[in-house]
Image: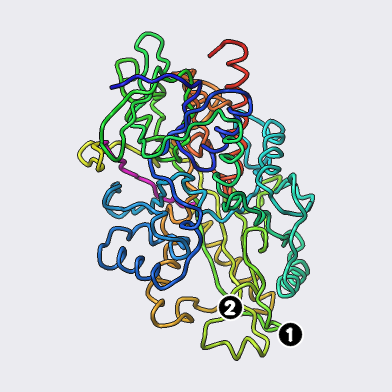
Amino acid sequence: MKDENHHDVVVIGSGCTGGTAAWQLSQRGLRVLLLEAGDHVAAKDSQPNSGLGTHLSRAWRVLIARCQQTQSLHPAYWLYPPRLFVDDKKHPYSTPDGRPFVWIRGRQVGGRSLTWTGLSLRLSPYELEGWPLLYEDLAPYYDEVERLMGICGARDDLPQLPDGNYRPGKSLTPAESIFRDRIASRWPERHVIIGRGIDHTTENGWSLKTSLGSTLEAAGRTGLLEIRANSIARRLVADQRTGCVSGVEIIDTKTKTSRLVSARAVVVCASTFESVRLLLNSQSAAHPSGLGNSSGLLGRYIMNKVSRSVTFEMTLDQTDVIHPLSASESFVIPRYENVGSQTAEIRGGFGIWGAIQRMPPPPQKLAAASRGLAFGFLIGYGECLPYFDNKLELNANVLDEWGIPTLRIDVRWRENEEQMAERIQRDLRAMVAAAGGSVVDAAASTGSVSRHLADRVLKAGSTPGAFVHEVGGARMGTSPQNSVVNGYCQLWDSRNVVVTDGACWPTAGWQNPTLTMMAITARSCSFIADSFTRGDL
C-alpha cells in the first residue's frame, strides 16, 4: 500500500457534512483531501426528471432487475434519476426477522445533498437538553451555514423553533393562509408558518442545497481542496502506542486495489450508518472492538423519525393557480407539545410539514379543481427516543462488493413511538377537518399506471428509516464512559478523529437534521483548525 502525505486533514464523505468540513477547514488555510466512495455526476444528470427514459429506467431497476427495491421506497427516488441511489445488491445489509429498516443511500460526489428537500430547521434548546453543548454554542455556526446556503424564511419568534439568518421568506398560498387562520382559531398554540429552506439560486449549474453548489464550491475556490472520487474508506489505521489515527486505508472502486493515505486529522462524515460502520471496521490491537468503542457504546442508541401523513382536499375560490412547491415554498407547524414542560402523554416532540395548492390534481379531478378544490398534504415527523438496544453491528458473513463487512441493523420503535405515531395521525386528521377539508387516498387518486408505485411510497412511512433522518451510533457525551465522542465530536479514544454527521447525536429531535449536522460540523472543524494553530494536532 502506498503512503501519500500532502494534506493536513482527510475528510470522509462529500455530502452536506463533508462539504461543510472541506469548506470550513480550507477557509482556515488547511489542506484538505476529501474522499468520496462514489463517482462524479454532472449537474445536468442530477436534476429531477420525469421523462419516459427515466421512468423506464426506474421500472427496470425495481421490477425486473430488482436492484433498487429498497431505494424505491423513498419518495425522492421517483423524482430524481435512479443513478443517485445505490444498487441494493452491491450494497447489502441485513435486519432481524420482523424488524425491517429502509436504508436510503447515494454514492456520488455530493452524496445525498443531491436528493434532500432542503428543509432547514434549527434545533431548539428543548431538543438539545442532555447534549454536552448549548444552543448558544451552535447559534453562530447556524448563522454561517444559513448565510452560505441561502436559507429563506421568516422571523416567527417561537422558542421551539429559533429564527435564523434568512433571506426573505416566501408567501403562503391563498389556501394555506385560510388553513393557517382556521387552525389558529381552533388551536392558538399550533403555529402555521412559512417553510424555511434553500433558495433556488444555483452555482455552476448546481442548486445551493447541494454541497457542489455551496460548500464544495466555496472550498474549491481556496485552492486547498482535493476531491478523490471512487475511493472507499475501508478502515482508519491507528498507532498502537498512542491510539491516534495515522492513516486511512482506501479502496479504489474501479481497480479494487488498496492504498494508505496518511492523516494528521480525520473528519468522519460518511453518513450516520456508514460512519459507524467505518469505525467498527477499524479494529486494531489498540482498538480491538472498533475505533472509539472503549465504552462499548459504538453502534448503540440508533434513532429515526416516526412519521405519519395525510393527503386532503379543501374547497375554496380561485384554486386554478398551482403554486411552486419546495422547502421554502410550503409551511411548517413547529412542535407544540411538551414545550417548556411535559404536557402530553408522550415523551419528546413532533412537528409537521405541509403544503396546499402546490400540487396539480389527479386527471380525474381536473374539472373539480377549476370549481374550487385545492389539494394538499401534511407529514408529521416525530422524535424517536434513544434506546440502547437500537443498534448497528458488523456482519462478517455478508461482505459488500469490495470485501468489506456489512451492517446488521436492529432498530425498532417502542411504546412511546407507537403512541406518538397514533397521536400524529389523529392530529393531522383533526386539523384537516378543522380547516374544512377532507382526507383523500392519494394512491387511489393517481392514474392506473402509477397507482402501485404510489402505494409503495405512501406505505413506506410506517417503516423505520424511510425518511432518511437516522442519527446516533457514536453519541456525544461528557465522559468516555457515557459516550463515544466529546462535545466537539472528538473521539475519546483517538483525539485526532472527529465524527460530525448524525452519528454523534445523543437525541434525535423532530426537525430535519441536515442543517444541525452542518452547524455541528462547522463548529468541530473550527476546533480542529484552532488545534492546528496551537500545535495540538
Q: Residue at x 39, y 47 (%)?
A: 411
Image location of residue 106, percent across then percent down: 41, 49
Residue where numbered disc 2 is placed: 360
Q: Residue at x 52, y 29 (%)?
A: 476
Q: Answer left or right for 118 relative to 39.
A: right
Mark sitting earlier along the chain (2/1)? 1
Look at the picture and state if 273 lies above or below 201.
Answer: above
Q: Quadrant of residue 452?
A: bottom left
Magenta segment boundaries in residue numbering: 404-416
Furthest residue in direction left, as rendered: 397
Q: Furthest residue to the top?
A: 241
Task: Pinpoint residue 295: horizontal percent, then vertical percent.
Answer: 41, 23
Compared to 390, does 375 lie above or below?
Answer: below
- Seen in the image, is 226 located left or right of residue 372? left
The x, y position of residue 468, in whole percent, is: 47, 51
Who is closer to the viewer here, 392 or 110? Answer: 110
Residue 355: x, y in percent?
64, 68
Q: Is residue 511 visible?
A: no
Front-most of 421 and 329? 329
- Residue ID at (28%, 22%): 1
SS at circle 1: loop
User: Which mark identifies residue 90?
Assistant: none
**Which disc is residue 317 wearing?**
1
Label 2 SS: loop
Could you tell me if residue 359 is visible in this image?
yes
Query: Which amino acid does the dot numbered 2 rest on?
Result: Pro
For the point 61% across and 44% down, which residue is it? 214
The stretch drawn in magenta includes residue 104? no
